[in-house]
Amino acid sequence: MLHFKRFGATLRSKPRRRSLRSLIVLVAALFAAGAAAVVFIQPASSHGTAIGPSSRHYGCWERWGSDFQNPDMAQEDPMCWAAWQNDPNAMWNWNGLYREQVGGNHQGALPDNQLCSGGRTGGTRYAPLDNPGAWKTTKVNSNFTFTNWDQANHGADYYRIYVTKQGYNAQTDALDWADLELLEETPKILPGEGRTPPSGGGTLVDIDVSAPGRTGHHIVFMIWQASHFDQSFYSCSDVWFGEGQPTEQPTDPTSAPTSAGPTSGGPTEQPTTGGPAGIACAATATVNSWGSGATVTVKVANTGTQAIHNWMLHWQWPSGVTLGNIWNASHSTMGTSEMAAPVDWNKAIPIGGSVEFGFNVSGALASAPAFECFPS
């Protein structure tokens, strides 16, 4: 069991109850060096976020990732609905809310009212996370365990865990620095120190937090200063202290995730998947099989009436097929679920245009899997 103490903080390996649902993909990464280059999979750009209590963006993805176009979300989960409508890729990229080269000046990088979006990192992508309102909450006691998922084993120079002061109104007041009380700060945590998740790679880091004297809806704000590089990760988690009806029950990060994604097989050209009005894409693929493996070339086409600024593909492999390498895209996986996202140069697709990427696989693959295309 790991123990870390500093400023009254205790960090340790400790089982907690949580159930993950609506799992499609994780956003991990690799980068291709050019059209002719082959880059082997690595988790270099896989990052992480708070999963217990869930960050706002992770919670929205967890609840609605497999059903994000369901109009019932507007009534059942209006804060997540606004976030999904603003930019679906903010939810698919739930593990990418960070800033670089902050140099420890977090208050300088994150203005008041922009803490939950990491100071509007990525432009307006995560901006709805700053909005006060009826965010789903997780019920906690005054002493609770905060769990962060360090997917790529970045380690940490420190974690700082803040909780809003009693009297703060999360329904009406966007978060300011003055609303927060710093309750825990960890010492340096080496890469890989913590618990091993049941799947998905990386490390679960548990931090015990004591937040006495609070009732009702509060926000837990995290700063995770990664050790591998000057990258600062931020998150807001909505919690409920004391009596009353929380809007979301505690869940267990030690439970094995389930996957819900497109089935394998089927035609190589997939139906267009909707994004914002007028933005749509579809994927076609050719498979060059040699029996024990195959090379797959995928074309992502803009099938809508507006230019695409970013896109992602989701799919599942048939049994026995595994990815060997990929070029001109980034890749992530958990269980049987897969995702490909563009590199910098092929994110944008003009009206009527298309981009390509490719990968090699091991195993018998006679036809392309069923891709789902998500544009923004």
Image (cartoon, helix red, strand yellow):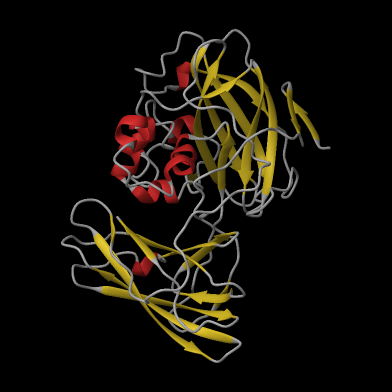
Asked whether the viewer can see residue 252, the reply is yes
Left or right: 88 with respect to 38?
A: left
Q: Position of residue 357 (x, y in %)?
A: 41, 76
The quadrant holding residue 213 is top right
Q: Position of residue 218 (x, y in %)?
A: 49, 19
Left or right: 108 with respect to 259?
A: left
- Residue 238, placed above or below residue 120: above
- Residue 136, placed above or below residue 330: above
Quadrant of the rendering where the N terminus is positioned: top right
Outermost residue toward the right? 1
Asked whether the viewer can see residue 124, the reply is no
At 44% across and 13% down in the image, what residue appears? 168
Q: Position of residue 333 (x, y in %)?
A: 56, 61
Quadrant of the rendering where the C terminus is positioned: bottom left
At 60% across and 81% down in the image, what residue appears? 363
Q: Position of residue 135 (x, y in %)?
A: 41, 27
The quadrant holding residue 44 is bottom right
Left or right: 277 with respect to 67?
A: left
Total number of numbered labels? 0
